[in-house]
Structure formats: C-alpha cells, structure tokens
Amino acid sequence: MNKEIIENIWKKIIPSGEGEFEYKLLSKESIPQLNIGFNKKSQRCLILELPFDFDKTFQQFEKENLSLKYFKKEKCLCIILNDDFFNDLFDDLILSIYSKIYNISNTEEYSELFTRHFFKWSAFFENKKTDGLTREQVKGFIGELFYLKNLLHSSEISVDDVLISWRGPYDEGHDFIFEFRDYEIKTIESSKNSVRISSEFQLESEKGKELELVVIFVNPDNENGLSLKSLINDIKTIVLDKLGDNSIFINALAQKGLTIGDLDQYEIYRYTPIGEISYDSTSENFPKLIRSSIPEEINKLNYSISLNLIEEFIINKKQF
C-alpha cells in the first residue's frame, strides 16, 4: 500500500451527494474492511466497517479539522476530513492506520487501534500559522533530514528509535541523541570553510558519552537538488516500508511549524549534498566554548570554527 494507490482510488470516486457515503475498498488484502470515500458534503472519509454482530457503541469527537463518527445503522467508524488543505496528510493517516491493522482479525483490537490513531494524528490537522523558515533554516533542516534518511537506511536499531533520536526540532541540545553517542549536524555550502556554533551547549557532551560534529557540504541546485518536501516524502516512505510510526516524524516537523500540506513554499530552496565530514568534538583539545568551561556570567555564545584548522580531529569522510 502506498500513496499512489490511494490517489488512484480517490480519482475513481465521483461524489454525487446521493448516499450517506460513496466509497471504494482500500485493499482486498486487508482483513478489516477499510474503505475511502466521500460523504454527502463531499468530504473525504476513511471508513472502517464493523461486523453487524459486534455489540459496541463508540463515542464521537470533533477536532479542528478532523472528526470521528460512529454510524450505528451502517455499522461503521468513520474519520472525516473537514479541510481539503490537509488532503496529503490525510493520505498519510490512512497509510498509517492501514499498516497497523490490515492483518488483524480481532474486531475489538483493530477498532481500538483505529480510534487511537485518530487521537494521535488529530493534532497534526490544526491550522497553525507561523512566520515560516528562512533560507538558512531550510538549508539546515535539509542537512538534518538527509542525515536522518541515511540513518534510517543503515541503522541496526528500530526505525521508531531512530525517529525518536532526532531531537533537532525540539532544541534539546544535540540534533541526534543516542545512548552512547550524540551527533550535532551542521550544513554549509561547499564554498564555505567554517561552521557557526550558536550556543555554549551545542558542543558540550554528556559525561560518559561521545559527541560528533557532523558537517554536511551542499551545493545550491534549484533544478535537481533535494528539497524539504522531497526528503520528507522519502522519509515517510522509508518509515512505512519498515513498519514504523510516521506520527513520531510528523510531530517532530510540527515543532518547527512544518506541516505536510504547506511544503511547496520551500521548493525554491534546493540543495545537493556532495560530502560529509565527522569530527571528534569530545576530544580534549578540540576548539570549543562550552558551558562547563566558561564563566557563568557569559552566556548566549555565538562563534565560528574554521574547518581547515581542525583536520586532526576528523574521524570520518564521505563523498556523495
């Protein structure tokens, strides 16, 4: 199951407004009967059919742009999208629910998962207005997403644990946090020779943990480069293929005001990664200003490190 399949089904449904729903089966391979379609108001819906001998009543909920309704006569649970702006995100919700329940035969279990996903995802369907990201912020985010994508491909730990490790959007010190090693990601254009450190905490490692400074070099490429949208779509696909939970990823994006339906505005900012260098910033002689080694009267530091002067601390190099 993927977005292309879902999009093809949407195209085949022409709402007339005559019945309660007009819908089509999502997949014959699914044990629970999951359908997508439109209601009388031509709103997109995800419909879970329930056995007629299943004796349970469900509560109904109205969120900002998403509703959960139970139709007793038709014996079905229905998630209704109230704003077409979120069509793409609604498809992500459909894929997430499908991947979690398609092979479950117990009605109590799959109906519970269906409603649980409604609550988990409903916060993503809110109209949050932000000032948007600057070009520099987009470049930095593209570097973090590129690194996350590579981790998802190569890591031996679970996909959900990799997603949870990405703390950059939460401003929690380091961009990726693991049990024994953290990673701070910096993205610069290949013509530059320094990275900016924006606080006294970015290069401070926890006791007993290693910290790598990872510099990703990119070239501006408005035609063929990676964009926020392309990377986000790639990552969502990887997570689905690995049976992970995309709500973890989407929640991280939301911390910076990024919504799935509002990514086109950043398509003008595209970059091609050309290389990556990792530095051992835990080394005693690595040049850094950190909280534990500066006077307490000094704070909110902002400084640059010249990369050509720290080559002795290189621990890994990659070319893309």
Image (spheres, grey):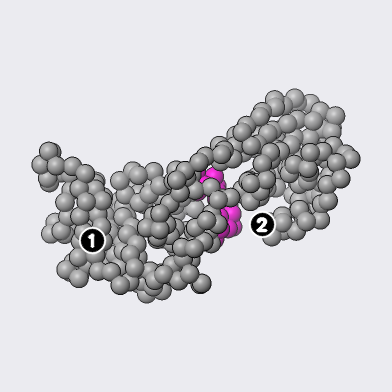
Indicate whether residue 78 is drawn in magenta: no
Q: Is residue 185 left or right of residue 261?
A: left
Q: Give the camera-side residue of 142 and 248.
A: 142
Q: Depth check: 300 or 314 in front?
A: 300
Label 1: element kind: strand
Q: Residue at x 45, y 45 (%)?
A: 131
SS state under label 2? helix
Residue highlighted by disc 2: 3
Can residue 49 be seen? no
Upstream in sequence: badge 1 or badge 2: 2
Residue at 53%, 58% (x, y): give it: 229
211 to the left or right of 286: right
Does 288 appear above or below 68? below
Q: Is residue 214 left or right of residue 261?
A: left
Numbered label tally? 2
Residue occupying the far front of the picture: 131
Residue pointed to by mark 1 = 280
Query: Taken as a whole, is the magenta stretch helix, strand or loop?
Result: helix
| Residue type marked 1 | Asp
Name the quadrant containing residue 71. top right
